[in-house]
């Protein structure tokens, strides 16, 4: 190919970096502190990422609950160091960064404040793919002249894309709907790492025929397919993919950027990113990572979960199931729970297994195994069946609906309208309850989203109560002392055996 023809076919792949958000959320329980991001923030700004996702998802919850950091300060502080690279956040539609649908007044105030503190791109998704739950958030994103990334949750009921629910027609129709809503980009959000390489090639190829905005792919390495999936998506014409720097990549996070950069070098998809620069950034992460190693899963030899290829249950959902069964001294019943999940999921309307529906389905499946089917029903399941999370992909089983909604406080006939239309405004009541402890708009929103833990955080923030040890950061010096003690104990044990 001559130089002119080669240039004409160039389509450099754009990269969104997930290191500061989903990388440590997936692999290190979202425990990375802002202080460990700042030393490489300016260098990250020079890489040339399309965007960096730095906020949203579980970060808001974990920061105030476990790190005693004000979530609103992270994007604000990072913006002082990252002046060129756009910031993105993961927003759960009407759920925002919580686990239920909030009233419209909370959504409007939250999005406006997020724009103010530095968010440029909003990755908006809904656990049921009910885009009516985008409405209020998107109105404020557009009003603030920010980028609306319309996300569709990728899910399956078969081994591959197809079947009666999550088939090619479903995804094409949903993506058309997002484009009609004014999405600036459309992102396929594969939270469980279950999209197969040839399936994504088919999906991206067909979307490119009908979608005019850039197409973005997000997947996790959980099943081991992610790098192959990215290559097939790139060949099909995907515009943007999500990666992490190697120390925080793979396992249940995203593919690593470094091998992808080398793979695409001198091809039409060449990212143009500097491998040496990326390796230097990774070295910093390797130095600080020991502070968070206690949160890294070490219970298996494999760094991928091949089981997800069969049961399709996301890694975070698996850990929650294991925790619940351990508390009930019933870990031996995990295979029964795996078998129960698809049955419960189908009865509850076949929701994609992503926060919060993965927890809703998972907890009910555990209760069905331990207590008998629907003998004990969570409030969240009742809210889901009633319609407070939106419209499920398939109808809820009529018999299960009767059982779940019997005596339900809101009524026994499900709603069919936009879920938030049935919610009363919340901010004024929250303001009255929290009183003077909330000194800023950010404080009030933190409390409105998380009344119990939010109030506790505000007491720590303003010195009403002392921060407990579990929210104080572990230093590298402490980690090194622990290493020395472990090494000494091992040596002594070897001498004893000798």
Image: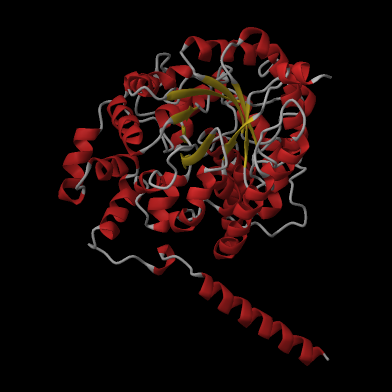
Residue at the image point whose x is 39% and y is 30% from the top: 101
Lateral position of residue 241 relative to residue 84, left or right:
right
Query: Viewer-proximal residue, 495 or 48?
Result: 48
Residue at image coords 70%, 25%: 157
Q: Spot the residue most to the front.
A: 3
In the image shown, does 422 or 236 lie closer to the viewer?
Answer: 236
The percent coordinates of residue 60 (x first, y second) are 41, 45
- Classify residue 380 as left or right of residue 136: right
Residue 87: image location, x then y, percent: 46, 36
What colouring style does the render use? Answer: secondary structure
Q: Quadrant of residue 327?
A: bottom right
Q: How many marks are shown on the rendered structure?
A: 0
Task: Give residue 241's quadrant in the image.
Answer: top right
Q: Is residue 211 above or below residue 295?
A: above
Q: Is residue 432 above or below residue 176?
A: below
Judge whether residue 421 can be spotted in this image.
Answer: yes
Asked whether 308 or 34 is in front, the reply is 34
Give the side of residue 80 with respect to residue 165, left or right: left
């Amino acid at each position: 190919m001559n130089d002119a023809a080669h240039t004409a076919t160039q389509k450099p792949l754009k990269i969104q970096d997930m290191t500061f958000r989903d990388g440590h959320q997936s692999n290190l329980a979202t425990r990375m502190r802002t202080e460990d991001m700042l030393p490489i923030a300016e260098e990250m700004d020079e890489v040339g990422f399309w965007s960096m996702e730095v906020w949203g998802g579980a970060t808001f919850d974990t920061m105030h609950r476990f790190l005693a950091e004000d979530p609103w300060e992270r994007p604000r502080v990072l913006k002082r160091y990252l002046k060129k690279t756009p910031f993105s956040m993961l927003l759960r539609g009407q759920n925002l960064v919580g686990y239920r649908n909030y009233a419209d007044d909370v959504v409007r105030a939250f999005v406006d404040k997020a724009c103010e503190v530095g968010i440029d791109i909003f990755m908006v998704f809904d656990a049921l793919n009910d885009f009516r739950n985008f409405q209020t958030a998107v109105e404020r994103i557009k009003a603030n002249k920010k980028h609306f990334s319309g996300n569709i949750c990728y899910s399956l009921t078969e081994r591959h894309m197809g079947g009666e629910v999550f088939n090619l027609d479903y995804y094409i129709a949903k993506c058309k709907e997002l484009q009609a809503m004014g999405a600036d980009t459309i992102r396929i959000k594969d939270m469980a790492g279950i999209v197969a390489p040839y399936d994504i090639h088919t999906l991206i190829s067909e979307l490119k025929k009908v979608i005019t905005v850039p197409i973005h792919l997000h997947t996790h390495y959980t099943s081991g397919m992610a790098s192959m999936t990215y290559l097939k998506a790139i060949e099909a014409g995907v515009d943007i993919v999500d990666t992490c720097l190697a120390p925080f990549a793979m396992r249940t996070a995203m593919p690593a950027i470094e091998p992808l950069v080398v793979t695409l070098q001198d091809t039409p998809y060449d990212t143009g990113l500097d491998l040496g620069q990326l390796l230097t950034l990774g070295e910093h992460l390797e130095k600080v990572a020991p502070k968070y190693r206690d949160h890294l899963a070490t219970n298996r030899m494999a760094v991928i979960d091949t089981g997800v290829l069969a049961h399709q249950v996301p890694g975070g959902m698996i850990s929650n199931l294991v925790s619940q069964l351990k508390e009930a001294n019933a870990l031996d019943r995990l295979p029964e729970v795996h078998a129960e999940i698809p049955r419960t999921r189908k009865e509850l309307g076949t929701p994609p297994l992503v926060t919060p529906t993965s927890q809703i389905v998972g907890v009910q499946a555990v209760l069905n195994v331990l207590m008998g089917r629907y003998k004990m029903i969570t409030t969240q399941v009742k809210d889901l069946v009633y319609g407070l999370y939106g419209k499920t992909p398939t109808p809820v089983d009529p018999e299960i609906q009767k059982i779940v909604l019997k005596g339900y406080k809101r009524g026994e006939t499900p709603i069919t309208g936009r879920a938030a239309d049935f919610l009363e405004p919340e901010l004024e009541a929250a303001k009255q309850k929290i009183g003077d402890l909330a000194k800023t708009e950010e404080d009030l929103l933190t409390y409105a989203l998380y009344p119990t833990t939010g109030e506790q955080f505000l007491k720590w923030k303003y010195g009403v109560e002392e921060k407990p040890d579990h929210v104080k950061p572990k230093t590298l010096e402490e980690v090194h002392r622990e290493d020395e003690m472990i090494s000494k104990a091992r040596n002594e044990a070897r001498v004893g055996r000798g």
